[in-house]
Amino acid sequence: MKHLFLFLFTVFSCIATAQTFAGISAPVRRTVILTADEAEFTISVAATLDSTQQQVKQTLQNAGLPNPTVVGTGLGQNSSADLPGAAQILYSATVAIPAGSAIDTAKRLETLRAHLPAPIQSLQYSVAFNPSQTTVDAMRQVVMPQLLDESRKLAQSLAAAAGVTVGAIRSVSDSAGAVKGYFLVPTAVARIGNFSSASLFFSLPSSTQYTYYANVVFATGQ
């Protein structure tokens, strides 16, 4: 019992000291539902060794993808046959579009995949549906005042337990995040080059959970 008393005394002494000199830290969070209004396509392309990033970008633009970002990711071998084939340059391209245009864009990619122009030799892709940055920022303007109010109430409860008062805000940090959901093109659809049947198996996500975090540090007084 004596050891327990000493342990608790030490803990509360440390808490009181931290509150007196460092302030009270009051982390809070709020989870909301946001519209998944943006579709981000990630496209993997394999092309011949004499290909360029500009050629890949132009091919995707010709297929109707607006201003894709294309980067080279490495070298590989053509694995479409039973035995490894010639070496290829591997590219990764990304493009974000309104979610409502995802099916039409995927159909354009399926048409491109069925008639690949030189120097492209293969193409695969996936789609992630998420709130756009505009949507995330707009909700942040709504949520942040609520989080600050909740944080002050939490700080006041902690301060009352410690026998101190809550002062001005010393610092604020915040963040937000969500788990991405992926819409993958089925292998069978990829082989036959017909995306129209994919809509029978998938429904496009209309919303996603997003969590906003805030950590507010308040000054304290006696």
Image: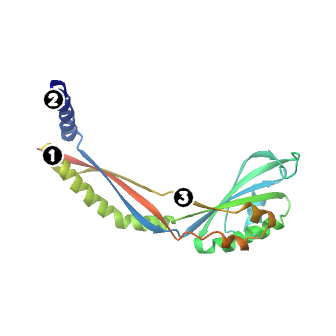
* Among the two numbered marks 3 and 1 on one chain, the one whose residue lies closer to the N terminus: 1
Identified at 17% across, 50% down, the residue is 166
Work out which residue is located at the far top of the displayed protein and give it: 3
- Report helix, strand or loop for mark 2: helix
Q: In front here: 185 or 58? A: 185
Q: Relative to 87, is 109 above or below? A: below
Q: Nearer the viewer, residue 126 or 97?
A: 126
The kind of residue tagged 3 is: Lys
Residues at marks 1 and 2, CA–CA distance in whole angstroms:
18 Å
Q: Disc 1 vs disc 2: which is toward the camera?
A: 2
Q: Quadrant of the C terminus?
A: top left
Against 83, is 112 above or below? below
Q: Relative to 120, is 141 on the left or the right?
A: left
Q: Could you tell me the amino acid type at mark 2?
A: Phe
Taking the image as shown, residue 187 lies to the left or right of residue 79, namely: left
The tag earlier along the polypeptide, 3 or 2, is: 2
Considering only order in the chain, which callout, 2 or 1, is on the residue closer to the N terminus?
2
Residue density around tag 3, few if under 14, some if 14–19, many if 20 or more, within 10 Å: few
Q: Residues within 10 Å of mark 1 (few under 14, many from 20)?
A: few
x and y percent of residue 51 in the render?
Answer: 82, 54
Which mark is drawn over residue 5?
Answer: 2
Q: Residue at x 15, y 25 (%)?
A: 2
Q: Which mark is residue 161?
A: 1
Q: Which residue is mark 3?
A: 180
Estimate the x, y position of residue 181 in percent, counting from the top left: 56, 60
For the residues marked 3 and 2, what is the alpha-carbon distance in whole angstroms?
Answer: 48 Å
